[in-house]
Image (cartoon, grey):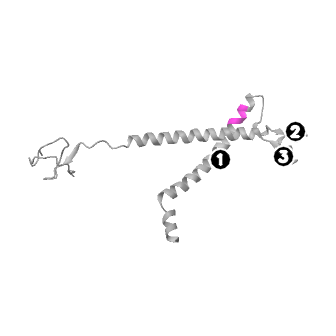
Amino acid sequence: MWKEFREFAMRGNVIDLAIGIIIGAAFGKIVTSFVNDILMPPIGLLLGKVDFTNLYINLSGKNYSSLADATAAGAPVIKYGVFLNSIIDFIIVAVAIFLVVKQINRLKKQEVAAAPTTKECRYCKSEISIAATRCPFCTSELLDTGRPLK
């Protein structure tokens, strides 16, 4: 059983998947930092110096000066500013993944092999045109018997 598990785990696809998950997690951290530290501050400034991480709805009825104060007091709050940041994170990651997959698919389409233009003469093994009915090297007549020529 251990041998089977080791063979499964060492297959290329499993290792590739593990590497992808690790890189994806690191990419997620970069995107979160980009949204929280670079993208949202200018947007908040344009909207009247709003810090999106401090946007919340207090459900307790008491007044708190910030989300940190409300959370420290144990007040029930709806953190819609944090939720907005998460939505923006998701959109950026989704667009990035879409662009990567689109490029991979474009490259795969280019890799499609072209139809063969030559075949091998079954008598002298020379490479000849696929449309040839007689080999130009050994002059054998090439009758199409339905069998593959190679």
The residue drawn where x is 16% and y is 46% is 144
Using the numbered discs, state the Cα–Cα distance from disc 3 to disc 2 in whole angstroms.
11 Å
Q: Residue 42 lies in magenta, yes or no?
A: yes
Q: Nearer the viewer, residue 148 or 116?
A: 148
- Give coordinates of residue 129: x percent, y percent: 18, 42
Q: Which residue is mark 2?
A: 65
SS under mark 1: helix
Q: Secondary structure at mark 3?
A: helix
Kindly report which numbered mark, 3 or 2, lies closer to the viewer in this rendering: 3
Mark number, residue 66: none
Q: Residue furthest front?
A: 146
Q: Amino acid at mark 3?
A: Thr
The residue that label 3 is drawn on is 71
Three-letter amino acid code of the residue under disc 2: Ser
Mark pair 3, 1: CA separation: 24 Å
Query: How crowded is the residue under tag 1: few (<14 C-alpha within 10 Å), some, or many (20+)?
Result: few
136 horizontally vs 32: left or right = left
Q: Which residues are magenta?
A: 39-43
Judging by the rendered image, the residue that carries numbered circle 1 is 29
The majority secondary structure of the magenta stretch comes to helix
Identity, as a three-letter code, of the amino acid under mark 1: Lys
